[in-house]
Image: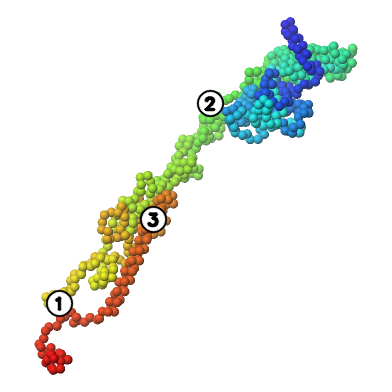
Amino acid sequence: MATSMGLLLLLLLLLTQPGAGTGADTEAVVCVGTACYTAHSGKLSAAEAQNHCNQNGGNLATVKSEEEAQHVQRVLAQLLRREAALTARIGKFWIGLQREKGKCLDPSLPLKGFSWVGGGEDTPYSNWHKELRNSCISKRCVSLLLDLSQPLLPSRLPKWSEGPCGSPGSPGSNIEGFVCKFSFKGMCRPLALGGPGQVTYTTPFQTTSSSLEAVPFASAANVACGEGDKDESQSHYFLCKEKAPNVFDWGSSGPLCVSPKYGCNFNNGGCHQDCFEGGDGSFLCGCRPGFRLLDDLVTCASRNPCSSSPCRGGATCVLGPHGKNYTCRCSQGYQLDSSQLDCVDVDECQDSPCAQECVNTPGGFRCECWVGYEPDGPGEGACQDVDECALGRSPCAQGCTNTDGSFHCSCEEGYVLAGEDGTQCQDVDECVGPGGPLCDSLCFNTQGSFHCGCLPGWVLAPNGVSCTMGPVSLGPPSGPPDEEDKGEKEGSTMPPAATAGPTRGPEGTPKATPTTSRPSLSSDAPITSAPLKMLAPSGSPGVWREPSIHHATAASGPQEPAGGDSSVAAQNNDGTDGQKLLLFYILGTVVAILLLLALALGLLIYRKRRAKREEKKEKKPQNAADSYSWVPERAESRAMENQYSPTPGTDC
């Protein structure tokens, strides 16, 4: 009795509301499944729109699937047909997808880091209008973007637009309204009339409508029978109640607003399946074979509990014993949810079925290998290491060492690892190392190595690093003693020779005196100044050798000219500018000194040859008497010898 009085008071409250019983829809509303969607016009911020929905027990609408997107599009189409004031070309309507301040964009997810205000971090469906801007400093909200000048088609679902959430008095650009969603335990079927009349439904979220496809639980129905005011007294009031678990009914019996005038000709008498007329203008509802008439005497239900498809989603209905009840069953990879009517995915990765990485998928899972590994054969088997150093796939420039799940590169002696990924090798300039030059004199960098060299007159020691004085080479005298003396007077740079003139022996015969002279330099030997004190070891500075350059790793290698272009070409382009400049200065100085010495030597040789030619012209031919002296004779002989004496034998 108390329940009946409470329902009566509820109906009275609903009927006293404006618009109740008029049969006109006050808002755009679509009810399907276990949810209702309402569309509202108004320039509100996202927070104000959410507050409006929340006051009536709902939230801003979710669009978690393409099917739900079609429901939202239908309710928006209703609103646009009724709102002639929406003259803008582009309009936006808030939905319940938002991203809080401090939470950044995640491009790898369908919702890009956004979440539904009613719950749900991520869902597979998305319909973004364009790429999102990466921002974390402010709250962002999503709206449906509609072209108000074009009709809404099922094949063209509204796009999602992301932007600022707005504020009171400043909702945002092109905001025209919002969409709410209300969820319920279940729905009642719409009431069917057997004669003229009007049904007005008032929902728990304070929306009135007379054209609902499904009526949410706890909704009230006001039925006014008749065609005019004279039939106004024929009114009925009903409430959608849960008659049994998951069974919702109005609690009415028999067709409503029955009219003997029309019989079964009006709306099939309000019957679900068959309508049977009586002889006195009355009629009854009936059901086809395999169905039974329910308590409302209008609706037919299958005798097979599964015929009404009580199981939702991917669940299948299985009859119980004697066909009186049923159970829902899920396919492999799914399990029943809390309602025991729908299926949800099973996360198989919770049991760690894979050797390395497990990725859950709808109804199953797949195994993946970590980076550096690959599947060991087809199927969901183990993973094996990838040999990154195999022929044709090594990423290293020189040496490659494979490791378990990875690899590392190495370089030959004289090179170091380089590059951002550490796979390239760069030459080491040993001549500019942190410990200073490795050579005592000259150092030349090469690809992967280096070699040492010496200045002219020095040779590389067996250790390939130090320089020693070259051996002295003795040659024959360059000419007679008098020629050497004359050449010395003419400015020769050769050392003076110690000579002795011819003397007579006891018998008056000439006796050769030994002649000694210092070794002279060959005319074609390069002459240079003494090497720097820091580069030259102690020794006689008067003897020079050709420059000798050897590799530091092979002391007996081929010799190379120290001042030629080959030594300059051997420079490593990777050396520093300071080292190159120092080598250019040294080599340039050596070349200049060699050129000056060569010029001086050429001038000396020319003057010596010229002096020899002049000496030959002036010198008379010698005879054998030049080496003897006359013995004194008698006076007569001398007197006779004087041809100019006037008197023979006298001097005057």
Residue position for label 2:
352
Report the side of 432 relative to 51 (left or right): left
Q: Quadrant of residue 87?
A: top right
Q: Nearer the viewer, mark 1 or mark 2?
A: 1
Residue occupying the point 14% across, 83% down: 630
Question: What amino acid type should be assigned to the residue bearing mark 2?
Answer: Ser
Residue position for label 3:
585
Whichever of labels 3 and 1 marks the residue nearer the N terminus, that label is: 1
Residue occupying the point 52% across, 33% down: 370
Residue occupying the point 24% across, 67% down: 496
Q: Nearer the viewer, mark 3 or mark 1?
A: 3
Q: Residues within 10 Å of mark 1 (few under 14, many from 20)?
A: few
Q: Residues within 10 Å of mark 3 (few under 14, many from 20)?
A: few
* Element at label 1: loop
Residue occupying the point 26% across, 69% down: 488
The Cα–Cα distance between marks 3 and 1, rounded to whole angstroms, is 63 Å
In the rendered image, residue 494, in percent from the top left (x then y), is placed at 27, 66
Q: Is residue 649 above or below residue 35?
A: below
Q: Residue furthest bottom?
A: 647
Question: What amino acid type should be assigned to the residue bearing mark 3?
Answer: Tyr
The Cα–Cα distance between marks 2 and 3, rounded to whole angstroms, is 72 Å
Whichever of labels 1 and 2 marks the residue nearer the N terminus, that label is: 2
Q: Nearer the viewer, mark 2 or mark 3?
A: 3
